[in-house]
Image: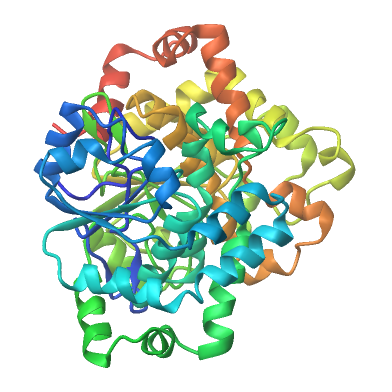
């Protein structure tokens, strides 16, 4: 099985994801695929799931849960299948009971996260298992969120992955776990499953606890009892050569991402074929060379003409690329402002992002024209607007729906935008409360156009027929994304 994926498609879990594909070492390398999978509970794995895990190369399972959790939902499928199984609880039984029976407010949870990274002997035990194991290692707790999130953070820190990637890897967890009704049993009475959210402040508390006290991840792991040689071995296992990036590190763009690696009906979406981004007007020559080597050939600019004039695509000066101007703009967007720097905030307050997105998918002629341009384009294709969030987000949603990617993956793809965007100085400078509302990429925003399509057209095929997109264009788009 090809290991360049973002999430492993299993019948018995909701949140089994790769740690591979994240840029590290200033983008010169990336985390290796096929080394670590993070997951939620495994007690419902099917026989088919077991075969998928074996084919993927999984040899070892590390269970981070309490003894009480294990007694209620043991990892019987993987144990009976012969995987190496280790119980390595990240919390004592008392800590677990206090966590489950305590309050679920952000302050309490943040404190719990900070305390977890100070469980030095437990952290050391986890990494010693890793260092003595071959093949792909799957580690998990119940939801794959808190304890699994902590260990994922530490592994990515060892690889020197940027914070924006680490926080996004954690952030999207709740989008997947919100599908798992089994988790309701762990909540206080009256607390809804929809309230299970991954709060960035919680993981940041753990991240800061490590760096504020020790300065580096290496010093922290030494405090846990690991030798310098062991830490280097961990790093070498995690970090490999550049390849199928999920987030491409560029000097002149912050939100350049590949749509590859998502599970769909016929396999997984391809890397190097369809990419999404923010403004690419500031790309350096090194960026352009890198993108050409990555396979980029065609750029579809979704911005207003005024926006494009302020910051022309850097690819226009490079004859290796084909540039298409395809303004993805409705009359509502025109009222809001002619470019990203002159948005009419009074107008913007009158409409939610979700409604703006629905307005876009309702414009059948506009959507058809844009999808046809992408269908006809050659080579690797980049589509982008200014922030790579709204217009780009809607097109990404439609393309992933055409590839028959699942709802949670589509939502997660959109959800990651905000933490990439705020790395951009001009965006970060504007983050007052008014701008914050516009810049956040909440799941609810992309959920509304998605459900609008399902409610009104039953599925993406019905929507594409309604807008008049030809079957040949639909197949061309699907073939660009879905592996043969």
x, y percent for residue 378? 25, 40
Q: Coloured how?
A: rainbow
Identify which residue is drawn at 14% across, 66% down: 133
Q: Is residue 383 visible?
A: yes
- Judging depth in this view, the residue of 146 and 321 nearest the camera is 146
x, y percent for residue 470? 34, 13
Q: Is residue 339 visible?
A: no
Please say if 78 is above or below 467: below
- Judging depth in this view, the residue of 278 and 204 nearest the camera is 204
Identify which residue is drawn at 42% across, 83% down: 217
- Judging depth in this view, the residue of 476 and 443 nearest the camera is 443
**391 on left or right of 433:** left
Please say if 148 is above or below 208: above
**125 on left or right of 344:** left
**121 on left or right of 172:** left
- Judging depth in this view, the residue of 10 and 435 nearest the camera is 10
Please say if 384 is above or below 183: below
Query: What count of labels does the image hold?
Result: 0
User: From the image, which quarter does the N terminus lie in?
Assistant: top left
Name the quadrant containing residue 78: top left
Please say if 31 is above or below 376: below
User: From the image, which quarter does the C terminus lie in?
Assistant: top left
x, y percent for residue 404? 34, 24
User: Residue lying farthest right?
Assistant: 346
x, y percent for residue 444? 64, 34
């Amino acid at each position: 099985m090809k290991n360049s994926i973002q999430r492993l498609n299993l019948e018995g879990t909701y949140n089994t994801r790769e740690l591979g594909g994240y840029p590290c070492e200033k983008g010169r390398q990336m985390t290796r695929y096929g080394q670590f999978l993070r997951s939620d509970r495994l007690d419902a794995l099917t026989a088919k799931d077991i075969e998928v895990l074996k084919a993927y190369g999984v040899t070892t399972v590390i269970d981070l849960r309490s003894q009480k959790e294990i007694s209620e939902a043991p990892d019987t499928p993987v144990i009976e299948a012969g995987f190496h199984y280790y119980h390595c609880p990240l919390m004592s039984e008392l800590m677990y009971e206090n966590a489950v029976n305590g309050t679920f407010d952000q302050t309490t949870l943040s404190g719990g996260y900070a305390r977890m990274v100070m469980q030095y002997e437990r952290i050391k035990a986890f990494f010693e298992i890793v260092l003595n194991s071959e093949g792909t290692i799957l580690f998990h707790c119940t939801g794959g969120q808190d304890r699994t999130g902590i260990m994922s953070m530490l592994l990515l820190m060892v690889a020197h992955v940027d914070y924006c990637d680490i926080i996004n890897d954690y952030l999207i967890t709740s989008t997947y776990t919100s599908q798992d009704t089994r988790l309701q049993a762990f909540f206080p009475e009256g607390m809804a499953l929809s309230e299970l959210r991954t709060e960035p402040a919680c993981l940041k508390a753990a991240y800061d606890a490590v760096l504020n006290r020790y300065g580096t991840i290496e010093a922290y792991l030494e405090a846990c009892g690991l030798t310098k040689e062991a830490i280097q071995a961990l790093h070498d296992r995690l970090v490999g050569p550049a390849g199928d990036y999920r987030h491409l590190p560029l000097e002149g763009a912050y939100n350049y991402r590949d749509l590859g690696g998502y599970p769909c009906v016929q396999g997984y979406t391809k890397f190097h074929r369809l990419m999404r981004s923010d403004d690419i007007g500031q790309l350096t020559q090194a960026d352009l060379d890198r993108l050409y080597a990555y396979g980029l050939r065609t750029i579809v600019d979704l911005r207003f003409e005024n926006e494009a004039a302020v910051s022309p695509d850097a690819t226009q000066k490079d004859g290796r690329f084909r540039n298409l101007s395809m303004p993805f703009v409705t009359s509502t967007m025109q009222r809001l402002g002619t470019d990203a720097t002159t948005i009419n905030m009074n107008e913007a307050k009158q409409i939610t992002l979700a409604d703006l997105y629905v307005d876009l998918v309702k414009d059948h002629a506009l959507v058809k024209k844009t999808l046809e341009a992408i269908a006809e384009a050659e080579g690797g294709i980049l589509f982008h607007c200014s922030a790579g969030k709204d217009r780009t987000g809607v097109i990404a949603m439609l393309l992933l729906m055409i590839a028959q990617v699942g709802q949670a993956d589509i939502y997660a793809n959109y959800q990651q935008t905000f933490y990439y965007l705020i790395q951009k100085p001009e965006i970060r400078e504007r983050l007052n409360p008014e701008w914050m509302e516009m810049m956040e990429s909440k799941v609810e925003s992309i959920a509304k156009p998605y459900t609008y399509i399902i409610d009104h057209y039953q599925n993406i095929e019905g929507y594409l027929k309604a807008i008049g997109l030809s079957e040949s264009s639909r197949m061309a788009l699907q073939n660009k994304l879905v592996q043969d």
